[in-house]
Image (tube, grey):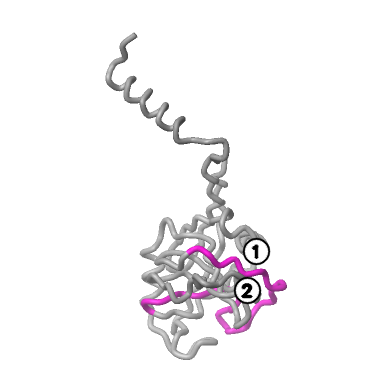
């Protein structure tokens, strides 16, 4: 039996895949949920990565569902580095947080990724997060780290609204928050976190 060109090509591809596959082959992991960080400067759509950072994604969604981020501000803006938000209100009061979570560093801190801020100890992240304005390899887990004690946990990627991120990164800053010289003079407010339908099948 002879096959037309497109059919033959499809069969060749099918058999090639079968030859390369083995019993341990797994389908690609489904992506996590998507959220929109709605700010007074525009919307930032985020694809969360619940595969590589499940505890971190669950933690972020918990705060978002509770409305923790609604009405808070981006309180740290460092051009060419990060914009950071979490628990600070426009009047520079802070909100209560849940106990910290384990560190899930591993994914690279590339431009447009969202990651958890933390203190000096690995398992100290609560509600604070930042969006990378550039590739920041200094924030990545060190290659020699076998105990997962270094780096900052990336848990998603901006998929729309990076222009909004860049607009926030360009606002005038001064001593208007916990980081001297890095607080927006005019507060940049997170209005709400919107939940988009889960993209998992």
**87 versus 5 height, above or below:** below
* Mark identifier at residue 59: 1
Residue at the spot x=67%, y=69% of the render? Answer: 101
Q: Nearer the viewer, residue 3 or 24?
A: 24
Q: Which residues are magenta?
A: 79-107
Residue at the spot x=46%, y=30% of the render? Answer: 18
Residue 104, percent from left and from top: 59, 66
**106 versus 181 height, above or below:** above
- Mark closer to the chain start, 2 or 1: 1
In the image, taking residue 180 as reference, residue 23 lies left or right, namely right
Residue 94, percent from left and from top: 63, 81
Residue 161 lies in quadrant: bottom left
Dominant SS type (magenta): loop
* Mark identifier at residue 125: 2
**89 versus 108 height, above or below:** below
Most extreme residue toward the top, as rendered? 1
Residue 19, percent from left and from top: 45, 31
């Amino acid at each position: 039996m002879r096959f037309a060109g497109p059919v033959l090509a499809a069969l060749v591809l099918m058999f090639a895949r079968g030859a390369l596959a083995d019993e341990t082959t797994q389908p690609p992991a489904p992506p996590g949920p998507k959220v929109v960080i709605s700010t007074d400067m525009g919307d930032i759509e985020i694809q969360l990565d619940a595969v590589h950072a499940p505890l971190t994604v669950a933690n972020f969604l918990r705060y978002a569902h509770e409305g923790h981020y609604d009405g808070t501000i981006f309180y740290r803006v460092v051009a060419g580095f990060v914009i950071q938000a979490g628990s600070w209100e426009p009047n520079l009061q802070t909100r209560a947080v849940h106990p910290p979570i384990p560190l899930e560093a591993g994914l690279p801190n590339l431009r447009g990724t969202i990651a958890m801020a933390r203190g000096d100890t690995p398992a100290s992240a609560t509600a604070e997060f930042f969006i990378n304005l550039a590739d920041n390899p200094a924030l990545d887990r060190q290659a020699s780290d076998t105990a997962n004690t270094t780096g900052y946990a990336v848990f998603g990627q901006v998929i729309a609204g990076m222009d909004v991120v860049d607009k926030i990164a360009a606002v005038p800053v001064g001593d208007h928050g916990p980081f001297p010289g890095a607080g927006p003079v005019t507060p940049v407010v997170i209005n709400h976190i919107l939940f988009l339908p889960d993209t998992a099948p």
